[in-house]
């Protein structure tokens, strides 16, 4: 996993640039005050040991995600060996995963930084800065007590970029960083981390049935096919759920049930030694459609059964969005089409 360390003096724009960089890359932002503010709120003062421990938890858990990496902001006092040691320690965490660490130093005129110290975004995210007189004086004190800008050639890392952002908008700076380091754009990682699939309990089947009817009814009204899940009875769903080789899962995004997927292990029925899994049905509630949730759910299904040799499903030929989704997931069309009625044809898909 990769790491981008954005360093610089107080109010130079580390967090704001990090916010902009997060929007155009597959990196999540962990700015310094995300841990500082809760500690001040709870303890009534800054406690460096508590902040460091909380950061450690975030670093450790973030390593389990699927993001390309993290953006970490830090005010580095170059005249303190302890700060050099701390940055080295954080960098090693990411390098030990095989990741790359990038260093971005922002510098800006003091007058500009004092203006930025009063901006709405800064005060919204950093409660400890809202006493502006104290906050301004703290910036001035930090600059006389510590050396917060590096000397020319002092930073030895190959992936280092220094930007004077005195007269640059944060969006421009973020684009400069992305281009200089050839950082990847946003991926599906955020959606994957926001979603999961969780097994449906027996007492939740009526809820599942209601969601299925709501999700498939627009297609039923369009095609009027007798096999539509929209007209499937609750008893039929209960019977299907009782089959030991088949399981229903809710698709959950940020704690909300947004759809469901049924996964059937048909390996024994196929009888050819292959591990064969079917998806039928999969659906997303209308109000959550077109957000990539079906793609995320299928990816989670793949992860749930890494032993699978073959995945199969079918869909409606006349619904190009559905076909595109499955092809994006790696499925290819196989076999002959099945004409259901004058308006609707089913096609089979397979992923090996």
Image (cartoon, rainbow, N blue to C red):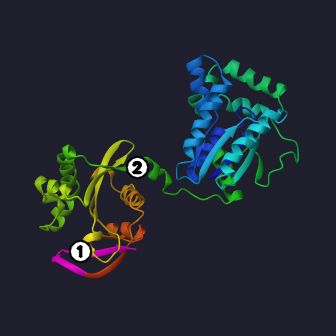
> Quick check: marks 1 and 2 in contact, CB under 8 Å?
no
Observer-nearest of 347 and 203: 203
Relative to 133, does residue 220 appear above or below in the rendering?
below
| Badge 1 or badge 2: first in the primary sequence | 2
Instruction: Categorize mark 2 by other alpha carbons within 10 Å: few (<14), some (14-19), many (20+).
Output: many
Residue 283 magenta: no
- The image quarter in which residue 321 lies: bottom left
Mark identifier at residue 195: 2
Left or right of residue 217: residue 108: right
Mark identifier at residue 279: none
**Residue 346: percent from the left, percent from the top?**
23, 74
- The image quarter in which residue 37 lies: top right
The reply to whether residue 23 is in sight is yes
Most frequent secondary structure within the magenta stretch: strand
**Rendered residue at 18%/74% (across/down):** 343
**Rendered residue at 64%/24% (across/down):** 129
**Rendered residue at 80%/51% (across/down):** 157
Looking at this view, name the residue that lies furthest to the bottom: 336
**Residue 252: percent from the left, percent from the top?**
35, 47
Q: Quick one: SS at disc 2? A: strand
**Residue 348: percent from the left, percent from the top?**
28, 75
Left or right of residue 12: residue 299: left
- The image quarter in which residue 262 lies: bottom left
Looking at this view, name the residue that lies furthest to the top: 44
Q: Which residue is mark 1?
A: 346
Instruction: Categorize mark 1 by other alpha carbons within 10 Å: few (<14), some (14-19), many (20+).
Output: some
The magenta region covers: 337-352
Left or right of residue 27: residue 331: left
Relative to 51, does residue 94 appear above or below in the rendering?
below
The reply to whether residue 315 is in sight is no
Separation (CA) of disc 1 from disc 2: 29 Å
């Amino acid at each position: 996993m990769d790491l981008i360390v954005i360093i610089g003096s107080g109010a130079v724009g580390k967090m704001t640039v990090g916010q902009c960089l997060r929007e155009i890359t597959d990196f999540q932002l962990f700015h310094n005050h995300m841990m500082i503010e809760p500690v001040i709120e709870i303890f009534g003062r800054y406690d460096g040991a508590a902040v460091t421990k909380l950061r450690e938890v975030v670093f450790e858990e973030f390593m389990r995600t699927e993001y390309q990496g993290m953006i970490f902001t830090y005010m580095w006092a170059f005249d303190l060996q302890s700060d050099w040691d701390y940055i080295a320690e954080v960098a090693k965490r990411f390098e030990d995963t095989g990741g790359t660490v990038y260093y971005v130093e922002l510098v800006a005129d003091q007058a500009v930084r004092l203006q930025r110290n009063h901006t709405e975004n800064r005060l919204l995210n950093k409660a400890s800065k809202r006493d502006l007189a104290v906050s301004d004086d703290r910036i001035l004190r930090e600059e006389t007590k510590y050396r917060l800008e590096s000397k020319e050639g002092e930073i030895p890392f190959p992936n280092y970029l220094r930007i004077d952002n005195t007269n640059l908008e944060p969006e421009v700076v973020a684009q400069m960083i992305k281009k200089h380091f050839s950082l990847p754009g946003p991926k599906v990682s955020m959606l994957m981390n926001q979603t999961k699939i969780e097994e449906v309990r027996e007492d939740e089947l009526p809820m599942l049935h209601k969601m299925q009817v709501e999700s498939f009814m627009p297609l039923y009204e369009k095609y009027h096919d007798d096999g539509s899940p929209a007209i499937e009875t609750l008893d039929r769903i209960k019977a299907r759920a009782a089959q030991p080789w088949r399981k229903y899962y809710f698709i959950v995004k940020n704690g909300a049930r947004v759809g469901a997927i049924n996964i059937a292990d048909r390996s024994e029925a196929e009888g050819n030694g292959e591990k064969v899994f079917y998806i039928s049905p999969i659906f997303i509630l209308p109000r959550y459609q077109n957000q990539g949730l079906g793609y995320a759910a299928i990816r989670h299904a793949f992860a749930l059964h890494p032993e699978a040799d073959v995945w199969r499903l079918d869909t409606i030929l006349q619904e190009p969005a559905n076909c595109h989704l499955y092809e994006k997931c790696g499925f290819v069309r196989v076999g002959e089409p099945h004409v259901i009625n004058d308006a609707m044809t089913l096609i089979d898909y397979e992923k090996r």
